[in-house]
Amino acid sequence: MEKEIKQKEETEEETKKRTIVVPGEVVATGSAYLPGEGTRRDGNDIIASKFGLLEKSDKLIKIIPLSGAYIPRVGNTVIGQVIDVTFNGWQVDIASPQLAFLPVSECFGFINKMDLNETYTFRDMIVTKIKSIKSRGIDVSMRERGLRRLEGGMIIKINPTRVPRVIGRAGSMANIIKDEANCSLVVGQNGIVWIRGISVENELLAKEAIELIVEKPFVAGLTEKIKEFLVKRKKELGFKEENIEKKEIKEEKETKEKE
Amino acid sequence: MDVSNLTKKRIEELLREDRRLDKRKPLEYREIFIETGISKNAEGSARAKIGDTEVLAGVKMGIMEPYTDSPDKGSLMVTVELSPIASENFESGPPTIRAIELARIIDRGIRESGFIDLKKLCVKKGELVWNVFIDIYPLNDDGNLIDAAALATIAALKEAVFPKLEDDKISYGEFTTKKLPLGNMPITITSYFVGDRFIVDPTTEEEESAKCRVSVAMTFDKEDYIHALQKSGDAPLTEKQIDEALTIASREGKKLHAKVLSQLKK
Amino acid sequence: MVYKREDGRAFDETRKVEAKVGIIKRADGSAMFSFGGSKAIAAVYGPRQLHPQHLQKPEKGLLRCYYDMLSFSVTERKKPGPSRRSSEISFVTTKSLEPVLQLDQFPNTVIDVYIMILQADASTRCAGINAASMALANAGLEMTELVTAVSMGKIGDAIVADLTKEEEDFSITKDGEEIKAATDIPMAFLSRSGKISLLQLDGKIKQEELKEAMAVAKKVCKKIEEIQKNAIKKINED
């Protein structure tokens, strides 16, 4: 789930070559490049249509956004808050311009159709997947392994454009945080992040690491730096190492029993 | 998105160990920054920041005939505009009860403490008095707007000067160097009840997790006095809890008072 | 009558321009812009849900701009709340920014832009538009280009850029009567296409003089645009 987006780790030089552009700026002329996301063709020029980092690769030129609201895409895994319970489903706030809807038909297992509150109720946080996007609304689904209501832990909100960095290439960054901070971690594509550690200290530690990544996403060798930071910080805070695996199995068991 | 029940639970758990998400102590304020003279057409103006919460306040003066029942007193009017600039939860339109309550809390602190002595705003008894308009605009809401608004207000009043009077009319755009006659500076400390204890200066998530709050305006001179008090929010409190909020206001108020004086001297 | 500017500026010179982005943390995008003593801030919230539902447009999103002034931003206190003047300025501001936004990418939603004048010394709507344009870019929205505004004026025979309040109120005495002698012309240009998205005028001016004013405005706006661009790019300066 967390391994959706792949991000190329950069060398220091590659970062320096990146330029920041604003809407209306010419980023290329002629037909050497095709206009990718965040750019448009205007006559002989390719123009930036968003504020962000310019990325040129082979024949494609595009903008990596540095800010902006989350734009939902089908297939995205997001974390949302249940804000209403209706007769046939739940309205979910997924921190995007449109509200999402979770129909009963998209849920697993036994559902008490007489009282949907028993399954999910107001202010519950759920990990869910975007199934379809239409002009009248977004539909989400729980029909996949790992999608569930979240228990315990805490929620933090980050800039959605930083999500690929927090997840890392093939989930590498997220795994470092999970291993070193001894916690479970779900990073929603919509910038909503859930952290659950074996203690609150672990959660606060993971939060610190994520805040660092969000602040400086384009530093080279960031994964190593975050690992070093976590190791150093644990020493500073006087952490006691604990085996996480046993705890995780216990959690999963508890969750399954509830369902 | 409102604060989730998960985070709220964590906030309450941490508080039982005297800890907060941003590593502050329960009765610790974020960094305070006060700047005056931020709007040159005002008789007095100030910007106050507590952490990322930012509020502007401005003083404008008017001249008028006094009310018949108080021929030697000027008037004071405090208005708060909760502009949608400061938060996605604020809407354009006429003042909401939240804006009105905030304005009246600040008003009582200024008025009852005698910070502005309305009698000293008299030009000619029975004929001409000054009125003081204080307008407060939050620019960024990250919790604890009340205390930030109170700080901006007292700073703006401290900087304020009288406008020029010519033939009993105000010459707009011209100022004197005569400062407003001010008394003891009131300090407002609001205690928020989160979980089962009080904290001060909450962030947005802490404020959304609070069950109620108690705002206290005090002056600290030879003796400490309470001039205004407002309990607000859903949950009721015991006498002991109210007393605790007053103790907090007294202790933290003194500290804040010293901080404000040093900021204003710069 | 040859007009000389009180502050010694050249006719095509603006007052000191200051620009900064990211000043309101809670907003999706924000910026500050000032022409000398006229200071404006803008905050962008959106795209977000549009209520009430009947205002929603299925084919494209809605842009709403709200212009307001601090009650103490002017010499005589302005009562809080909308006025006919602020409603009209909100309206023309919306129209000046709409052309650059790709609103069809956000059907049924709204982008709200709140402009607040912190200190007024004429040209406030132009300062507001300049701040709003930067705030929209800072919010990561898709825009074809930036929007840059300046208020031109005709004072006596001179075409000048960026009027002060004093210049706006300029009058001459003829036969013992005070006659208004300044024409105020706020304008906004789209940075790449050079098209005009805001144009208002009040006073007395000939067609050729207006053409000259537009030509000067275009040049002045090019300079302002550079300042806007640099401010938008400076995001990590805090």
Image (cartoon, rainbow, N blue to C red):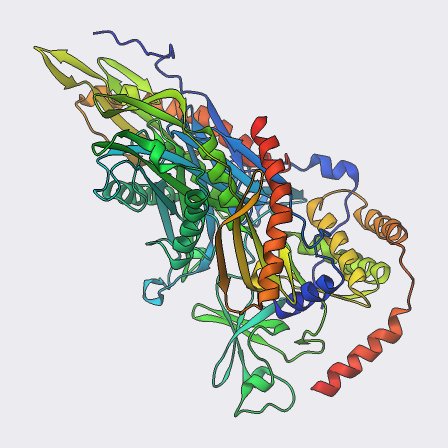
Q: How many marks?
A: 0
Residue occupying image coordinates x 56% and y 62%: B208
Residue occupying image coordinates x 53% and y 37%: C21
Question: Extreme top residue here?
Answer: C2
- Place of residue B68 in the rendered image (x, y in percent of width and height, measured from the top left): 21, 42
In this image, C195 relative to A121: left or right?
left
Vertical placement of residue B262 versus A81, above or below = above
Instruction: Please name whichever residue, B85 or B24, is drawn nearer the observer in this view of the structure.
Output: B24
- Place of residue A231 in the rendered image (x, y in percent of width and height, measured from the top left): 88, 52
In this image, A135 relative to A6: left or right?
left
Instruction: Please name whichever residue, A23 or A81, is drawn nearer the observer in this view of the structure.
Output: A81
Question: Extreme front residue here?
Answer: B222
- Place of residue A117 in the rendered image (x, y in percent of width and height, measured from the top left): 56, 84
Instruction: Please name whichever residue, B27 or A128, is drawn nearer the observer in this view of the structure.
Output: B27
Vertical placement of residue B202 versus B122, above or below = below
Any part of residue A44 in sight: no
Quarter location, residue A245: bottom right
Q: Quadrant of the N terminus of chain C?
A: top left
Residue occupying image coordinates x 59% and y 69%: A80
Any part of residue C151 in sight: yes
- Place of residue C128 in the rendered image (x, y in percent of width and height, measured from the top left): 39, 36
Instruction: Please name whichever residue, B218 or C112, is drawn nearer the observer in this view of the structure.
Output: B218
In this image, C54 relative to A113: left or right?
left
Q: Quadrant of the C terminus of chain C?
A: top right
Residue occupying image coordinates x 53% and y 39%: B48
